[in-house]
DNA sequence: TTTATATGTCAATAATTATGGACATATAAA
DNA sequence: TTTATATGTCCATAATTATTGACATATAAA
C-alpha cells in the first residue's frame, strides 16, 4: 500500500460520521446497507452523509451498487486488511509484529509478539 | 477502545508528516528516536515537527522521555494494537475476522478469514 | 558565566474540510 | 402522466488544522 493511500484511508476514518458509517457497514457485512438507512441510523442529513460516503468511497474503504432507487454501500474488507498490513509492516524489523499466511491457507494472520490482547476486546471463538 | 480515542488516532495518522514520523518510530522500535533526528530525516522545521509530535503524543500513539537536551520519542505499540483491534472487532459478527490469544500465550492474533495476504506485503518468517 | 544546541510555545496567516439549503436526477408508485 | 422517494451535486459559510517566524526554556560545552 502506498503512503498516499494509507493517508487517505486514515483521513476517511478520522471523522466521526464517517467512522460510525464505516462501522455500521463493517457490521452489516458483504450485503451492505442503503444510504438512507445509514442516514436514518446516524441522524445525519442525506446530503451531508452523501458527502461522507463519497469520501469513504474515494478512500476505497467502501464500494456501492445501485438497487432500485437506493444505493447500497458495503465495506471494502480487503482495503481494511491492507491498511492493517501497512500499519504493521514496519514492525517486522523490530520483531514486534509479523504478518503471514496461515497454515490452512485461507487466512492472513497478524501476530503481535510479546503482548496480550487489550482488555477492551474479549477473546472470540 | 472508545470511539473518540480511535478518531484521535486516525486523525493523527492522516497527515503526511505525522505518518512518516510514526513509521520512523515504529521502525526504530522501543529505543526510539530524538526529535531532532526525525526533524532532519524528514526535512521538516523543528517547530512544525514539534507540533506534529505533540499531536501524535496526544493521540497516545507515541510517548517520550528526556535525555540530556534531547527528547526521545518512541512509538506506543500497545495503542497501535488496540487501534487494529478496534477496526477488526465489528467484523466478528460477520465472521470476516477474529481476534484471539494465540496458543503460546504471548501473542495476540488477528485472523482474516477467507482472504489472502495483500501483494504489497510479502510473507515474513 | 557565556555561548551553542535541542526543543517547545505562541500567534497570525494560510490551507483544508465539514455543513446544510437549494436544486437536480432517477426510479417507482399512484 | 403526475407525484413521492432516494440520493446526489453545488455553493456559500463555518469550522478545523497546518505552517512558520519570533521568542522562551533548559541543558551542555567552551
Image: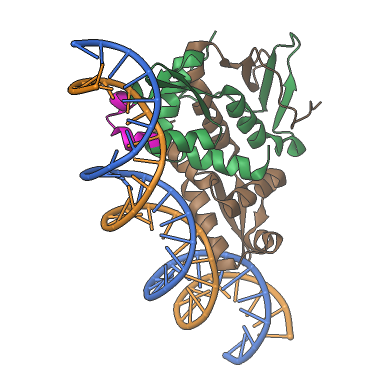
Chain colours: A brown, B green, C orange, D blue
Q: Which residue occupies 53% across, 37% down?
A: B58
Per the picture, the main secondary structure of the magenta-coloured stretch is helix
Per the rendered image, the range of residues in magenta is B39-50
Between B72 and A12, the one lying in front of the other is B72
D14 or B50, which lies in front?
A: B50
User: Of all residues shown, which one is farthest toward the right?
Assistant: A125
Q: Is residue A52 left or right of residue B52?
A: right
Does residue A10 sit above or below C21 in this rendering?
above
Residue B112 quadrant: top right
Rendering coords of residue A1 (x, y %): 44, 30
Classify the position of the C terminus of chain B by image quarter: top right
In the rendered structure, the answer to whether residue B114 lies left or right of residue B17 reads right
Instruction: Please state the horizontal and vertical placement of residue B59, each as a whole percent of the image.
Output: 54, 37
Residue at 74% x, 31% y is A121
Please name whichever residue, C7 or B104, is drawn nearer the observer in this view of the structure.
C7
Picture layout, residue A71 above or below residue B40: below
In the rendered view, tell whether residue B88 sits above or below residue A105: below
Q: Is residue A45 visible?
A: yes
Exactly how many numbered labels are in the figure?
Answer: 0
Which residue is at a point 67% across and 24% down the rendered structure image?
Answer: B111
Which quadrant of the figure contains the N terminus of chain B? Answer: top right
Q: Tell me, yes or no, if residue A2 can be seen here.
A: no
Q: What residue is at 68 percent from the left and 41 percent from the top? A: B2
Amino acid at each position: 500500500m502506498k503512503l498516499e493511500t494509507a493517508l487517505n484511508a486514515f483521513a476517511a476514518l478520522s471523522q466521526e460520521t464517517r467512522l460510525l458509517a464505516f462501522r455500521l457497514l463493517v457490521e452489516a457485512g458483504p450485503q451492505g446497507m442503503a444510504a438512507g438507512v445509514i442516514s436514518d441510523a446516524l441522524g445525519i442529513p442525506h446530503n451531508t452523509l452523501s458527502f461522507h460516503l463519497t469520501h469513504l468511497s474515494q478512500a476505497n474503504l467502501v464500494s456501492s451498487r445501485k438497487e432500485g432507487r437506493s444505493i447500497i454501500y458495503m465495506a471494502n474488507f480487503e482495503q481494511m486488511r491492507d491498511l492493517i498490513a501497512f500499519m504493521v509492516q514496519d514492525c517486522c524489523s523490530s520483531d514486534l509484529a509479523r504478518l503471514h499466511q496461515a497454515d490452512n491457507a485461507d487466512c492472513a494472520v497478524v501476530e503481535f509478539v510479546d503482548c496480550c490482547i487489550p482488555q477492551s476486546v474479549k477473546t472470540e471463538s
